[in-house]
Amino acid sequence: MVENIKLYAMRSFYTQRAGLIELEDDVLSIVQQIREAYGDRVTVEVDPDTLQYLFIEHCEDTTDRLIFQTSELDARALERLHRSDSQGRSYQDPYDALEHEQDELMSSQDERHQYRINAEGERLAHALKKDGIMPRLPMQVNVPRSLDA
């Protein structure tokens, strides 16, 4: 098994296996930002066989876990790393966000329909009283909360 090449937050560095490695400005910037945000807990490595950038988490139990891999190291990869960090401030569970959005949509639809149902119910109650079918039916008048409804 070929060992990955760990990228450091330095413009150029030497490894015994790969020799002198020089990082381009954009790659160096991403590696530095990851280093500032995560320290030694997350590193970027290069798989020499596939030339894919690997984001590796170094856990306290001495295991290394692959977070994700990408063919290009740019701002999108950094954003993806931040979004995948469930301990970070910017983490938002996509399933939970979708659930919340759907709940809000259903609630607004329910409010719109409830006003229409109440209006029709009032007309039905008035007609039943007027025709003498249910003369003791209590009459309710619903006032909308806003003028938009």
Image (cartoon, rainbow, N blue to C red):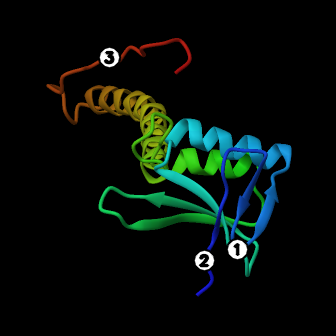
Q: Nearer the viewer, residue 146 or 83?
A: 83
Foreground residue among 120 and 71 = 71
Residue 97 is tagged as: none
Separation (CA) of disc 2 from disc 3: 76 Å
- Tell us which disc is closer to us: 2 or 3: 2
Return the residue nearer the eye: 82 or 129: 82
Residue annotated with mark 3: 141
Label 1: how many Cα within 10 Å (few below 14, some 14–19, many 20+): few
Q: Which residue is mark 2?
A: 3
State the mark number for residue 17. Answer: 1
**For the residues marked 2 and 1, what is the alpha-carbon distance in whole angstroms?**
9 Å
**Residue type pointed to by label 3:** Val
Amino acid type assigned to the residue bearing label 2 in the image: Glu
Q: Position of residue 77 (x, y in %)?
A: 68, 52
Q: In percent of the image, x 45 and y 53: which residue is there? A: 95
Evaluate if marks 1 and 3 touch, with contact meaning CB atoms under 8 Å apart. no
**In front of the other: label 2 or label 1?**
1
Q: Earlier in the sequence, mark 2 or mark 1?
A: 2
Residue 36, percent from left and from top:
57, 36
Q: Earlier in the sequence, mark 2 or mark 3?
A: 2
How many marks on residues?
Answer: 3
Helix, strand or loop at disc 1?
loop
Q: Position of residue 101 (x, y in %)?
A: 49, 42
Residue 76 lies left or right of residue 149; in this view the side is right
Compared with residue 30, is residue 68 higher up or lower down, i.e. above or below? below
Q: Residues within 10 Å of mark 2 (few under 14, many from 20)?
A: few
Secondary structure under the numbered disc 2 in the rendered image: loop
Neighbor class of circle 3 (other Cα within 10 Å; few <14, some 14-19, many 20+) is few
The amino acid on which the numbered mark 1 sits, given as a three-letter code, is Arg
Q: Is residue 118 left or right of residue 6?
A: left
Residue at the spot 35% in from the left edge and 63% down from the top edge: 62
